[in-house]
């Protein structure tokens, strides 16, 4: 890896979280990285290239958060643990999360999004696709274990993603406060109700939730 390039990506990430997307410019990134604007153009060809590299870095870290969940013999608990990791990443890194999934993402990033109901992926960029792939895999395991009914796996993954994303965005906006109420009183119960609606036994779903809570207490 190129040390100067890595420094500039890290600087872009820091500026993004600290000051927002509008603060990113060739000069601000170069200053934050302790290098020159010429270095940015040399390594990235301009700000579009840097934003792309920042997005790759964010997707990589997001995917690590989702796939870093140890696999157990309870696919529902593993799915819930992944959802908790998703929630934590988004709330801890709001600007990064909105860069890759927000409605106001730069066109240079948004143009790689695809219709999951038609393409089977949330993006046509291979290095960005693994996070949705992790969710798809979790859905497949729940169906294979008979915990939720057989259905279109991609559509189910999209439905479950919609629940998590919507709750996260509302919590970011302050509608559920900032003391964990959104997770405990909104998202958690909603996910349980959804899984039961998809065929899981309520007692089994609650046991899976308790296993996650115990592991994270």
Image: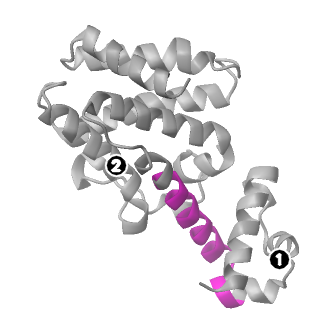
> What secondary structure prevails in the magenta region?
helix
The part of the chain drawn in magenta is 42-63
Please give the label number shown on residue 30.
Answer: 1
Residue at 49 percent across and 32 percent down: it is: 84
Along the line of sight, which residue is nearer the eye, 23 or 12?
Answer: 12
Q: Position of residue 11 (x, y in %)?
A: 76, 67
Label 1 sits on a secondary structure element that is helix
Q: From mark 2 to mark 1, how far is it between C-alphas?
A: 35 Å
Quadrant showing the C terminus: top right
- Report which quarter residue 83 is drawn in: top left
Picture mark count: 2
Badge 1 density bin: few <14, some 14–19, many ≥20, Cα 10 Å: many
First along the sequence among labels 2 and 1? 1
Task: Classify residue 17 as left or right of residue 2.
Answer: right
The residue labelled by disc 2 is: 134
Asked whether disc 2 touches disc 1, contact meaning CB atoms under 8 Å apart, the reply is: no
Q: Position of residue 70 (x, y in %)?
A: 38, 44
Q: Position of residue 156 (x, y in %)?
A: 25, 34
Label 2 sits on a secondary structure element that is helix
Residue at 61 percent across and 76 percent down: it is: 49
């Amino acid at each position: 890896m190129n040390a100067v390039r890595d420094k500039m990506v890290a600087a872009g990430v820091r500026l993004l979280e600290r000051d927002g997307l509008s603060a990113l410019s060739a000069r601000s990134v170069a200053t934050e990285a302790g290098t020159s604007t010429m270095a940015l153009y040399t390594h990235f060809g301009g700000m579009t290239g840097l934003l792309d590299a920042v997005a790759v870095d964010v997707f990589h870290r997001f995917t690590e958060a989702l796939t870093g969940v140890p696999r157990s013999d309870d696919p529902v608990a593993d799915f819930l643990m992944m959802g908790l990791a998703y929630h934590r990443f988004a709330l801890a890194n709001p600007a990064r999360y909105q860069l890759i999934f927000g409605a106001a993402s730069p066109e240079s990033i948004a143009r790689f999004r695809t219709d999951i109901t038609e393409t089977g992926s949330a993006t046509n960029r291979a290095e960005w696709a693994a996070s949705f792939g992790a969710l798809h895999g979790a859905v497949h395991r729940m169906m294979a274990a008979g915990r939720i009914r057989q259905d279109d796996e991609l559509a189910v993954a999209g439905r479950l993603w919609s629940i998590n994303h919507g709750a996260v965005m509302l919590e970011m906006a302050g509608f559920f406060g900032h003391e964990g109420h959104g997770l405990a009183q909104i998202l958690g119960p909603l996910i349980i109700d959804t899984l039961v609606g998809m065929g899981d036994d309520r007692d089994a779903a609650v046991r899976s939730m308790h296993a996650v809570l115990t592991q994270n207490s």
